[in-house]
């Protein structure tokens, strides 16, 4: 899998899997920080509007970078914009 930024800056290449016995499927997923932040704010607002608790559940073991980014962004937004409302 390769990522080549449009601005010419350094990208990256990552071997997803070294298929040995005939191959198999590969899945690539992405999300932007902006879309994750919008989703986080929407979740916090929905929770407050409904008066219900909010919990984020991730599989931060297999998809460490992907789910970890959700966790980090949710935490940043909680600390900055919503912590006072959930005390």
Image: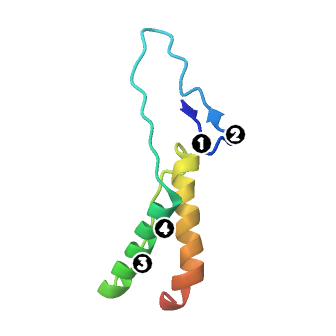
Q: Which residue is mark 2?
A: 10
Please provide percent x and percent y for residue 11.
Answer: 65, 38
Q: Which residue is mark 1?
A: 5
Discs 3/4, front: 4
Colour pattern: rainbow
**Between marks 2 and 1, how big is the CA–CA gap?**
7 Å
- The image quadrant that residue 50 belongs to is bottom left
Q: Which residue is mark 4?
A: 37
Q: Are marks 1 and 4 in contact (CB under 8 Å)?
A: no
**Tag 2: Cα neighbours inside 10 Å, few (<14), some, or many (≥20)?**
few
**Tag 4: Cα neighbours inside 10 Å, few (<14), some, or many (≥20)?**
some
Q: Secondary structure at mark 4?
A: helix
Vertical placement of 15 versus 67: above or below?
above
Q: Secondary structure at mark 2?
A: loop
**Between marks 3 and 4, how big is the CA–CA gap?**
11 Å
- The image quadrant that residue 2 belongs to is top right
């Amino acid at each position: 899998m390769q990522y080549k930024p449009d601005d010419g800056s350094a990208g990256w290449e990552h071997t997803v899997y070294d298929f040995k016995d005939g191959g198999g499927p590969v899945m690539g997923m992405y999300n932007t920080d902006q879309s994750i932040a919008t989703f986080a704010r929407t979740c916090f607002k929905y929770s407050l509007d409904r008066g219900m608790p909010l919990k984020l559940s991730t599989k931060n073991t297999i998809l460490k970078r992907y789910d970890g980014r959700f966790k980090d962004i949710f935490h940043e937004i909680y600390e900055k914009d919503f912590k006072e409302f959930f005390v």
